[in-house]
Amino acid sequence: MLDSAGMGRIDYEDVMRALGYFIDQNNLSEICLIELREGFLLRGISRTVKPGGYQSISESFLFTNEDIERIVNESYERRKPPAPAPQEEKQRGLFNR
């Protein structure tokens, strides 16, 4: 799919991975994903625990092409390996040997 500027391409695998992360973070189930010209429409059921049992709520989210580009970039950042900690220099003897 094209990015929001229409210049570069975003792999569907990366888009699905980013949307999957969103689904997991929002505890959605019974997912319906529709690709539109404007982006993606995501519908799902969220369940919350109430004193009397569970409450199910149907939720809908529209991800524009700009939103998709943003969440894919965020997913790239999450997957980057952490920067190595700076190593302390050991004091050396005479003439730094």
Image: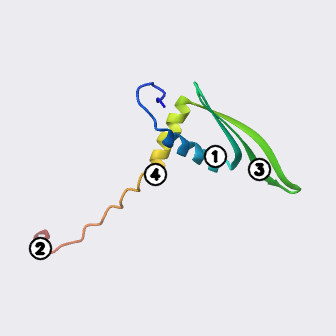
The quadrant where residue 18 appears = top right
Q: Up-down: is 51 above or below 73?
A: below
Residue furthest right in the image: 52
Which quarter of the rendered picture does the C terminus lie within? Answer: bottom left
Q: Up-down: is 56 above or below 86?
A: above
Residue furthest bottom in the image: 93
First reached walking from the N terminus: tag 4 or tag 1: 1
Evaluate if marks 4 and 1 touch, with contact meaning CB atoms under 8 Å apart.
no
CA distance separating discs 3 and 1: 13 Å
Q: SS class of the residue under badge 1?
A: helix
User: Residue 62: image x %, image y %?
Assistant: 64, 32
Front tag of 2 and 3: 3
CA distance separating discs 4 and 1: 17 Å
Q: Which residue is mark 1?
A: 23
Give the residue type at disc 2.
Answer: Leu
Q: Residue at x 50, y 38 (%)?
A: 12
Residue furthest left in the image: 95
Give the residue type at disc 1.
Answer: Ile
Q: Which residue is mark 2?
A: 94
Label 2 Cα crowd, 10 Å radius (few <14 / some 14-19 / many 20+): few
Q: Up-down: is 38 above or below 82?
A: above
